[in-house]
Image (spheres, rainbow, N blue to C red):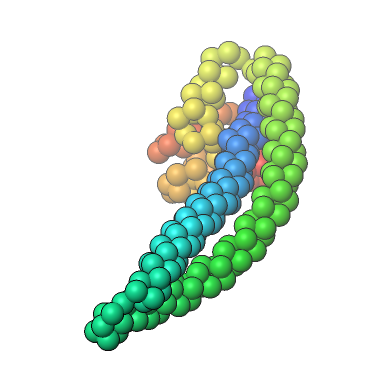
């Protein structure tokens, strides 16, 4: 096989690795973002629980003030009972006292409901705080792990780019520039194989004469449709 074709196939292997590494490097920060979004949602849940607890306590205080106000009125009416002179006044005051006491009973029922809700919210708050503490550690650990992987990928890409530069020196500059344009404009695939009589890059049917010429491997032949460089399957670059 022509040396240039061998070099081009090796370049394609390198470009496949570079492309895969770059895609992974772009994907990894999204993993961090997903983890951070999950953690942020848990933090929002904690804030929501705190707000609900605060609202619950405010309602309890208001109801306690209402009970205190009713008790003041009850005391006032009970004192007035000692000074009433008519049965009508006595009944009226008793009715007010009964009304206030019934009101307090209803308020106390509401307070019991609020206390039960407060207890449930405190449990919920305890659970979310435990979850936050656990997930914060997990988040920091995973972020560190992912950032290390990103650093490794950056070094790996740089090394492969250097290897590509060195390898490119073994073929004519004009051929490398042609290869590079294909890489940039053909979705990272400059080399294509002929599979079942069609170009693996664009699925265009290749003429029999061209298939024969490609099989010989003694000249650079391109696809008539997509312009990718055609090579025999057994000599293809991985992923080409």
Quadrant in the picture for residue 157: top right
Measuring 72% from the left and 39% from the top, which residue is drawn there? Answer: 140
Q: Position of residue 202 (x, y in %)?
A: 45, 44
Q: Position of residue 2 (x, y in %)?
A: 66, 28
Q: Nearer the viewer, residue 123 or 44?
A: 123
Measuring 42% from the left and 64% from the top, which residue is drawn there? Answer: 72
Quadrant in the picture for residue 92: bottom left
Image quadrant holding the N terminus, namely top right
- Residue 27 drawn above or below residue 105: above
Q: Position of residue 77 (x, y in %)?
A: 36, 72
Measuring 39% from the left and 76% from the top, which residue is drawn there? Answer: 82
Q: Nearer the viewer, residue 108 or 222?
A: 108
Q: Nearer the viewer, residue 211 or 186?
A: 186
Quadrant in the picture for residue 95: bottom left
Q: Answer left or right for 205 relative to 163.
A: left
Image quadrant holding the C terminus, namely top right
Residue 165 seen from this side: yes
Q: Position of residue 84 (x, y in %)?
A: 31, 77
Measuring 69% from the left and 45% from the top, which residue is drawn there? Answer: 136
Q: Nearer the viewer, residue 186 or 93?
A: 93
Residue 213 seen from this side: no
The number of discs equals 0
């Amino acid at each position: 096989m022509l040396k240039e074709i061998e070099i081009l196939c090796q370049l394609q292997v390198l470009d496949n690795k570079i492309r895969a590494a770059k895609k992974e490097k772009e994907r990894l920060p999204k993993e961090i973002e997903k983890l951070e979004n999950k953690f942020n949602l848990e933090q929002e849940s904690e804030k929501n629980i705190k707000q609900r607890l605060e609202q619950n306590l405010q309602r309890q205080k208001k109801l306690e003030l209402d009970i205190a106000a009713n008790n003041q009125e009850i005391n006032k009416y009970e004192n007035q009972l000692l000074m009433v002179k008519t049965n009508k006044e006595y009944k009226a005051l008793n009715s007010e006292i009964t009304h206030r006491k019934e009101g307090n009973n209803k308020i106390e029922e509401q307070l019991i409901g609020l206390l039960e809700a407060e207890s449930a919210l405190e449990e919920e708050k305890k659970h979310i705080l435990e979850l936050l503490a656990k997930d914060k550690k997990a988040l920091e650990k995973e972020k560190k792990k992912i950032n290390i992987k990103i650093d490794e990928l950056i070094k790996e890409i740089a090394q492969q780019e250097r290897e590509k530069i060195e390898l490119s020196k073994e073929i004519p500059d004009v051929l490398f520039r042609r290869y590079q344009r294909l890489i940039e404009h053909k979705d990272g695939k400059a080399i294509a194989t002929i599979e079942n009589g069609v170009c693996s890059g664009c699925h265009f049917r290749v003429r029999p004469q061209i298939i024969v010429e490609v099989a010989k491997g003694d000249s650079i032949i391109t696809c008539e449709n997509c312009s990718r460089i055609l090579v025999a399957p057994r000599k293809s670059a991985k992923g080409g």
